[in-house]
Amino acid sequence: MDVDGGGSTSGVDTAGVVAQSVRVLSRRQKALYQFTQQNLPACKPILTPAWVITTFMLLGVIFIPLGLIALRASQSVVEIVDRYDTDCVPETHKNNKVSYIQDESIVKNCTRILKVRKDMKAPIYIYYQLDNYYQNHRRYVKSRSDRQLLDGLNYKDTSSCQPEENSNGQPIVPCGLVAWSLFNDTYTFYHQSKELEINRKNIAWKSDREHKFGKDVYPFNFQNGTLIGGGTLNPTVPLSDQEDLIVWMRTAALPSFRKLYGRIEQDLDADDLIIVRLVNNYNTYSFGGKKKLVLSTSSWLGGKNDFLGFAYIAVGSCCIFICIVFLLLHVKTPRPYGDTTYLSWNRKSNAS
């Protein structure tokens, strides 16, 4: 009798455990189903006309002032833009600019005079701007070796650098068309008969200097071929310190772009005259490109860029317009609200 009683109790316990496990499994399946079917409790707002009109009004009230602030910041930036590629070609070579720029026997010095329209507070950024220059061309972008820039001659696989992979039977460091076409116009600035000091340090991204260009990698056999593409590099200075190259190697996405040349750490007053003595070396004439020299200040928002301000104003104005249209329609032809208890997510609770 004791044995039978013990067995009966064990059977009851086992059945209870099984029943509990089934309930737990059922709850888990139900929770999983609710999650996958998105039937979990959630905020489901009803977009009444009042809510829609108010939302559009708030967006307009927020975006338009932001656009005006951004536009004001952009307008506070003072820029001097001077295109010099045409004027710096002598009259005797106007009809054949390509032969002029490729003739190394011709001195290509040029003098430009820039007038400061408004006060320019330091730092004043110096950029060179190139137009109609497609640095995003597929063959051009791929003609480089990032591993070689970091490891130098220790990295042998530079097949991606073609056609500027080797010269005179020896490898080129840095190789590729991007480095080969390095910008090489130079600028010297004078103010009140004194040369302005140009700070050319820290013009490249810190991450590029420290992680993409080797501190022990030096230029080797660079620009020693039969066709010189652009600027030369100091073979005694490591690539991580050649910031002109680092700036140039960060290729631009658009055919018109600016690259930082240096900074003037001195304020300039309105109506000041800046004399620029430049060397017009870089060949943009063979493909119809343009060269410009840009002096620019900055604001808390960065450089001069009116697009962000106009975009905010346009979005805010559209929201205000939509708000007015919805308000007029609602006033003219109002519609009665439906009973929210008949919405799909309320039917189940009503039935229960």
Image (cartoon, grey):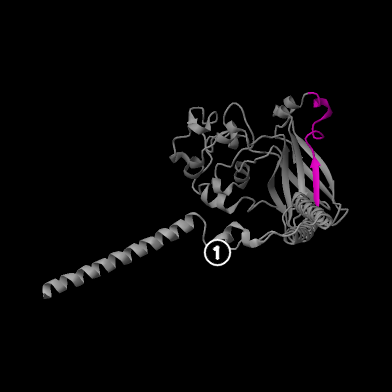
Which residue position holds label 1? 349
* Number of numbered discs on residues: 1
Whole-percent x and y of residue 330?
80, 56
Image: 321 above or below 97: below
Residue at (20, 72) in percent of width and height:
9
Residue span colored magenta: 76-95
Question: Is disc 1 placed on a helix, strand or loop?
Answer: helix
Between 160 and 23, which is closer to the camera in this rendering?
Answer: 23
Label 1 crowding class (10 Å Cα cut-off): few <14, some 14-19, many 20+? few
Residue at (65, 61) in percent of width and height:
340
Left or right placement of residue 274 versus residue 228 in this view: right
Between 276 and 38, which is closer to the camera in this rendering?
Answer: 38
In this view of the protein, can residue 105 be seen by the observer? no
Give the main secondary structure of the magenta stretch. Answer: loop
Q: Is residue 223 magenta?
A: no
| Residue 68 picture quarter | bottom right
Image: 178 above or below 313: above
Between 203 and 57, which is closer to the camera in this rendering?
Answer: 57
Between 70 and 39, which is closer to the camera in this rendering?
Answer: 39
Whole-percent x and y of residue 193?
82, 51
In this view of the protein, can residue 271 be seen by the observer? yes
Query: Looking at the picture, which amino acid does disc 1 mark?
Result: Ser
Residue at (73, 24) in percent of width and height:
99
Whole-percent x and y of residue 93?
80, 26
Q: Is residue 86 magenta?
A: yes
Residue furthest out toward the right: 271
Image: 11 above or below 313: below
> In the rendered image, which quarter contains the N terminus?
bottom left
Image: 195 above or below 245: below
Whole-percent x and y of residue 215?
51, 49
